Image (cartoon, rainbow, N blue to C red):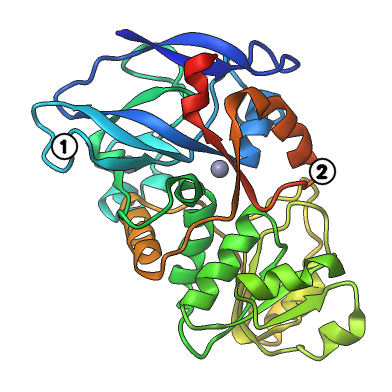
Amino acid sequence: MYNAKAFSAASATSPLASTQIARRDPTDTDVQIEIVFCGICHSDLHQVRNEWSGVMPTVYPCVPGHEIVGRVTKVGSGVKKFKVGDIAAVGCMVDSDGTCPNCKEGLEQFCPNLTLTYNFPDKHTGGVTYGGYSDSIVVDQRFVLKVPSNLDLAGAAPLLCAGITTFSPLHHWGVTKGKKVGIVGLGGLGHMGVKFAHALGAHVVLFTTSPGKKDDALRLGADEVVISKNADEMAKHAGSFDFILDAVSADHDINALLGLLRRDGNLTLVGAPEKPFPVSAFNLIFARRSLSGSLIGGIAETQEMLDFCGKHNITADVEVIPIQKVNEAYERLLKADVKYRFSIDMASLKGA
Ligand SMILES: [Zn+2]
Ligand SMILES: [Zn+2]
């Protein structure tokens, strides 16, 4: 074991503060990474404040962060994929059993024995896993990804959660050139959805409740912007979409969106409103429409996404902050006051 610097929360009501944590020494199959940037995901805030206590109660101290990019500093003797100095990334998962049907299909995110990057039982230390708000991390090579060399690292970090969360459903539902695709909500997830759908060649329509987001949506790659509260604008698009990606976590009218799908169209949820949706069965039945959810993506698909980003030069739009501003960033996140993801410059941790 060795000591790493980190920022952790001591309780649900404590601000994140500088601390030291114990990391394992790399085993034969491990990669040790010096973290350069870590994105701030809304899940970090939920977990730190124990807002998911029913499903995933938080164990304190909690070190969040699952949008990690950095430099390889050490590899185990059995590691062939990485060498010291490589730029590497780690997302939401750090381990799985590797033997269940999900793992065998490359869908580790659905493994019943999955280990998440933070606040999950850690078989190596006996405690819980600690995430990327830290100067280093040690992860099994199976869960370490390669970052294309042309990508800006601050903007690449959010690809590991916001990126794969939006790329995977677009991929799964066959979004290609010629398809009409709706992206609902222009936040951390939605702005990635717009970029990916555009790069895949689709006709992209961004749905938002904020007219002020129109110019930005067009800049990011949307072909059209629809103000979802405007019934006339919505009616123009009735029955015309092949696929809609819904990235909104606030309560909203799901039936109005389902009515925009064409026959056999699909709407996939990646945002998770607390209140259950009242779904109209007629809306689904009369055009064989479907409603789905999607959870991040498997490791192979995450690598595919990163390679796609390398090819199309796609990164998240980020505001880089030092770790000392993380508590302030959380408050701003609650007000959706960020375009479109915070990325923590981990060099700032050296002085902490
Ligand atoms: Zn996340
Ligand atoms: Zn498994």
Is the CB–ligand 1 distance for label 2 below 8 Å? no
Mark 1 is on which residue type? Lys
Q: Residue at x 80, y 72 (%)?
A: 255
Residue placed furthest toward the front: 351
Which secondary structure, mark 1? Answer: loop
Residue named by callout 2: 335
Instruction: Give residue 83's mark.
Output: 1
The residue sitting at 77% across, 72% down in the picture is: 214
Query: What numbered label is drawn on residue 191?
Result: none
Q: Is residue 68 above or below residue 200?
A: above
Q: Is mark 1 within 8 Å of ligand 2?
A: no
Question: What residue type is disc 2 on?
Answer: Lys
Give the residue drawn at x 58%, y 65%. 193
Residue 63, horizontal then vertical, whole percent: 54, 21
Answer whether residue 208 is visible to the viewer in this image: yes
Q: Which is more toward the observer, 108 or 12?
A: 12
Crowding at dot 1, Cα within 10 Å, few <14 / some 14-19 / many 20+, comes out as some
**Residue 170, percent from left and from top:** 50, 70
